[in-house]
Amino acid sequence: MTEGEDRTAGRQDPTWIAKDPLLGAVVVSAGQIAARVSELGEQITKDFWGRPPLLVGVLKGAFVFLADLARAIELPLEMDFMAVASYGTATKTSGVVRIVKDLDLDLTGRHVIVIEDIVDSGLTLSYLRKSLLARGPESLAICTLLQKTGQQRADFDVEYVGFEIAPDFVVGYGLDVAERYRNLPDLRVYLAGEPE
Ligand code: 5GP
């Protein structure tokens, strides 16, 4: 960059978050997320000592969480990603899930940790869990950044939960509405409610 060039040219308005009328209260701050991610990393490091895990990120919502969590785990590890689409509305899954992007790696004999952004009804994870268990991993655990209170209809345990939150629709830190807001550093209520 040459002297005198405008360094802010092309950048987003830094106050765009404050100016957005659809963004409500902060549900979990960036500082709270960082502290909890570091605790989860420590816990996973202890639990998986001597058996390096394979982190399976569920795209797209979990990518920010996985990027931070992976660096808080002090073990050699591998990661892979998959993407699923559920039949139903944008946010109310019917429980019938289609794998849109499958894993590249073989799960046989691996210690797998599925990394999710949010468990609402739990139906998406329930399907995913069964589908991954059928691939013969040595163990399979689930780690979700958020779990909505009182919403679960699925019959499995989530081993690692970042935060329990009220059933408001939230965005930020990887979670979107129509692909927006994934880059918010914190989690906020989306005031327009759940998109149809
Ligand atoms: P479940 O099958 O657990 O009901 O659905 C979970 C999926 O619904 C999540 O992976 C996410 O894509 C979406 N979802 C549920 N609640 C929220 C929310 O509050 N905000 C956002 N952005 N997505 C949500």
Image (spheres, grey):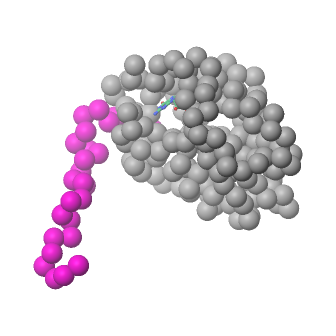
Q: Quadrant of residue 172?
A: top left
Residue shown at the point (80%, 35%) measured from the top left: 133
In the visual, does 5 lie left or right of 107? Answer: left
| Residue farthest to the left, as pictured | 4
Specify the quadrant that holds the N terminus.
bottom left
Report whether residue 188 is seen.
no
Residue 88 percent location from the top left of the image: 51, 18
Residue 45 percent location from the top left of the image: 75, 59
Q: Nearer the viewer, residue 128 or 4?
A: 128
| Residue farthest to the bottom, as pictured | 3
Q: Nearer the viewer, residue 167 or 16?
A: 16
Give the prevailing secondary structure in the magenta stretch.
loop
In the visual, does 134 lie left or right of 60? Answer: right
Q: Quadrant of residue 189?
A: top left
Residue shown at the point (84%, 40%) measured from the top left: 136
In the visual, does 176 lie left or right of 93? Answer: left
Report whether residue 106 is seen.
yes
Q: Which residues are magenta?
A: 1-28
Residue shown at the point (76%, 42%) measured from the top left: 141
Q: Is residue 27 magenta?
A: yes
In the visual, does 32 lie left or right of 54? Answer: left
Residue shown at the point (72%, 50%) measured from the top left: 105
Residue 179 percent location from the top left of the image: 39, 38
